[in-house]
Image: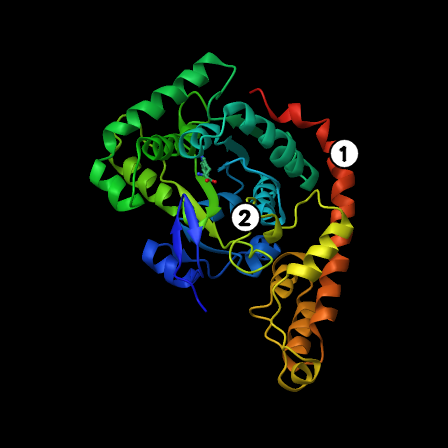
Amino acid sequence: MSKKAVVTPWEIKGDIDYEKLAKEFGVEPLKELPKVFNDNVLFRRKVVYAHRDIGRIMNAIKDKQPYVMMTGLMPSGKFHIGHMVLAQQIIFHQKMGAKLYIAVADIESYNTRGQSLEESKKIATEEYITNYIALGLKPKNCEIYFQSNRSQDAKKANAFYRLQNILAKHATFNEFRAVYGEITPGKMISSLLQASDMLHAQLPEFEGPIPVVVPVGIDQDPHLRLARDITKRFKTYKFTQLSSTYHKFMPGLGGGKMSSSEPTSYIALTDTPEEAERKIKKYAFSGGQPTLEEHRKKGGNPDIDVSFQYLANYFEPDDKKIKKIYNDYKSGQLLTGELKQILIKKLQQFLKEHQKNREKAKKLVNKFLNH
Ligand code: TRP
């Protein structure tokens, strides 16, 4: 049975129709992509599927001009394979030559979830940043900061603080209501703060006017709409309009969204290979038929099979191999148990390698902080 979807920056549930959502929000589908993008599985397989003004970023990459990749994270619970979607994009832009700005949204977590700043700091460093580094993030041209503590450099910190407070003049209450539905003072502050996260790289104390791309989950588009509208009205300083890209969410093991508040929905990057195997076998939603005979006769449905989605979107980059898995499953030649086994093997390899990298990464965290 399909459940009605709710997608706002602070709540995601139900069965999401991504194309419909893109239309509703007014974002463009990502169609023709340059080779450098297509070489990346997330773009090629349309996990990153929509955008606003991405042309400006593609031109910067093509012409070897500087640009900034700015994004943020809400630190909560375990870092799981769903979080990898954004991590991989951050690393992609670093390889493309972008300067990276990454905000730890500790103030947003405090104001919208009541999570203490200390707790956010601990989760952000031990879970998020450590895993980003283990996945390949490099310290060069990369600033990770906390919303509650932008910079050691007073000039930069003050510039951020100033911007954050004067953006309020350029937004209206009705706009907040239209953009967010139910609105609280904490949410209002969070969205204006996020607007300054996204815009401040262009201040003279930072990079000056420069193209900025913000890769986010599609749920975050309301924040971009607000920030882009403010940008148009803001006359104090001329910002280059923001670009953004939107990704789909990695499905949870049982379908729905993968969520750190629900351990049976995720594979954490710190799960042991045995734990990962157990979870896939027990919880991964199958598109197969109830009996072997039926499966052989009617075939399975890879489009709703969670193990297949994990392979297609992340763990089997080889186009020929994934096509064969798709066809074999659909024809009934490949059984659910066999499909799960293909995923388990890939996933275990990845986790083993990643967990070794994590040990090295732990020692490097400080290189990414304290700007
Ligand atoms: N609101 C974002 C989230 O829930 C986190 C965030 C804060 C962010 N500042 C940002 C995302 C700036 C993109 C750009 O995950």
Q: Which element carries disc 1, helix, strand or loop?
A: helix
Looking at this view, is 184 or 66 the one in front? 184
* Label 1 sits on residue: 359
173 horizontally vs 116: left or right: left
Q: Position of residue 200 (x, y in %)?
A: 41, 28
- Image height of 311 relative to 271, above or below: below
Q: Element type at marker 2?
A: loop
Q: Residues within 10 Å of mark 2 (few under 14, many from 20)?
A: many
- Where does residue 297 sit, x and y in percent of width and height? 66, 87
Whether residue 331 is situated above or below residue 193 in the rendered picture: below
Q: Residue at x 62, y 33 (%)?
A: 129
Q: In the image shown, does 111 or 63 lie closer to the viewer?
A: 111
- Note whether residue 316 is visible: no
Q: Which residue is at the front of the view, 66 or 48?
A: 48
User: Mark 2 sits on what residue?
Assistant: 259
Position of the C terminus, as image quadrant, is top right
| Picture quadrant where residue 40 is located | bottom right
Q: Is residue 16 left or right of residue 351?
A: left
Query: What amino acid is labelled 2 in the image?
Result: Ser
**Which label sits in the foreground, 1 or 2?**
2
Q: Residue furthest bottom?
A: 297
Which label number is shown at residue 96? none
- The crowding category of the residue bearing disc 1, from other C-alpha atoms within 10 Å (few below 14, some 14 to 19, many at least 20), is few
Q: Return the x and y of residue 359 as percentages of the image width and height.
A: 76, 34
How far, Cα to Cα, is label 1 from label 2? Answer: 25 Å
Position above or below: 194 against 247: above
Q: Earlier in the sequence, mark 1 or mark 2?
A: 2
Q: Residue at x 46, y 32 (%)?
A: 109
